[in-house]
Image (cartoon, grey):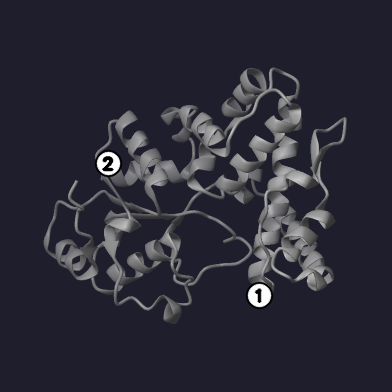
Amino acid sequence: MEEVPKRKLGELLFLYNTERDLRGDIFVEGPGDKLIVDYYLQSRRLRGRVYTMDSIDFSGVNFDELGLPHPSARSAVIALCRELSMNGAQVGSMLFIVDRDQEDIVPSPHINGVHLTDAGALPVHIYDNDAESKVCSLVLKHRMSENNLKRSVSAACFVLYAARAASKRLGISAKILPPSRDLSDDGQNGFVICKESYLRRCLTACGNSHQLPEFSVEVNSILERMASLGRSAYTFINDHDLFCVLKLIIDKVGLSAVSISDVENMMSMSADANRLATHRLFCEIERIATA
């Protein structure tokens, strides 16, 4: 199949400054995000076109000068919104969506005009109470309560979130590893993560184990900050972390052998447009797609 040429920024600027029928365009990071938004638009019978960052040519954009990490699809969405708005495009008729990531702890530059996901990442919106109930009944076969699963997922994912944010804040290299060795059943409230052991492994993987005291203090400070914000738990859950932790829990309960891809597919099949419509982000998608 012949590869479709990427659209250049100059071409986009020309289109958005001369055409009147380009309202409802939605820009997301990658193909997985596009699948979810496309599913939502089709299910709700909304118009709108969804574009991923790999369809746009960003040559000539200096991401370092903007203070944005690169290569990064998230940075590309932010840079695209900035370039279009600075050059007269009516960005209010479009939607630019990026994963929330560690935004609440480590803010990104030039984020104005860009919509953050409510959850840590767009696919995490699918993992609601209904999806959680299905995991407990159909996958874990009621060997774990929904409350214990909720606590287990949050406890592990929060540490991974804080470790990733601490690495950014301190400029310390730490590899965010699957917490397989450090996740254990406490026999009452579900699975807990041995934080000190996990953080040591993340640092050791990069040859930085000597920085554990400083790193541990920063992680604990971030965890306290997260708790003080009073936000929903899924605000601090990354999709890759979620799928990884769910796979580990399923493995440790010992009912079946699944891959992270299996878990991701299970979550995708739990998507329900009407439940997604209750989230602020999807209300914005609906607004743009009906304008």
Q: Amino acid at mark 1?
A: Gly
In depth, the one of 176 and 156 nearer the eye is 176
| Residue holding disc 1 | 171
Distance of label 1 from label 2 (alpha carbons):
43 Å
* Quarter of the view holding residue 250: top right
Left or right of 80? Residue 88 is left
Q: What residue is shown at x 56% (from left), y 33% (from top)? A: 263
| Quarter that holds the C terminus | top left
Q: Residue 257 in the image: x percent, y percent?
A: 64, 28
**Disc 1 residue crowd, few under 14, some 14–19, many 20+, Cα 10 Å:** few
Q: Residue 189 in the image: x percent, y percent?
A: 83, 33
**Disc 2 residue crowd, few under 14, some 14–19, many 20+, Cα 10 Å:** few
* Quarter of the view holding residue 150: top right
| Residue holding disc 2 | 290
Q: How many marks?
A: 2
Q: What kind of element bears circle 1? A: loop
Left or right of 276? Residue 147 is right
Sequence-first disc among 1 and 2: 1
Q: Amino acid at mark 2?
A: Thr
In depth, the one of 157 and 4 nearer the eye is 4
Looking at the rendered image, the disc whose residue lies closer to the viewer, 1 or 2, is: 1
Q: Is residue 184 above or below residue 215?
A: above
Q: Is residue 14 above or below residue 98?
A: below
* Quarter of the view holding residue 143: top right
Q: What residue is shown at x 79% (from left), y 47% (from top)? A: 182
Q: Residue 79 in the image: x percent, y percent?
A: 37, 69
Is there a contact, CB below 8 Å, between mark 1 and mark 2?
no
Q: What kind of element bears circle 2? A: helix
Q: Residue 190 in the image: x percent, y percent?
A: 80, 33
Q: What residue is shown at x 70% (from left), y 39% (from top)? A: 153
Left or right of 75? Residue 256 is right
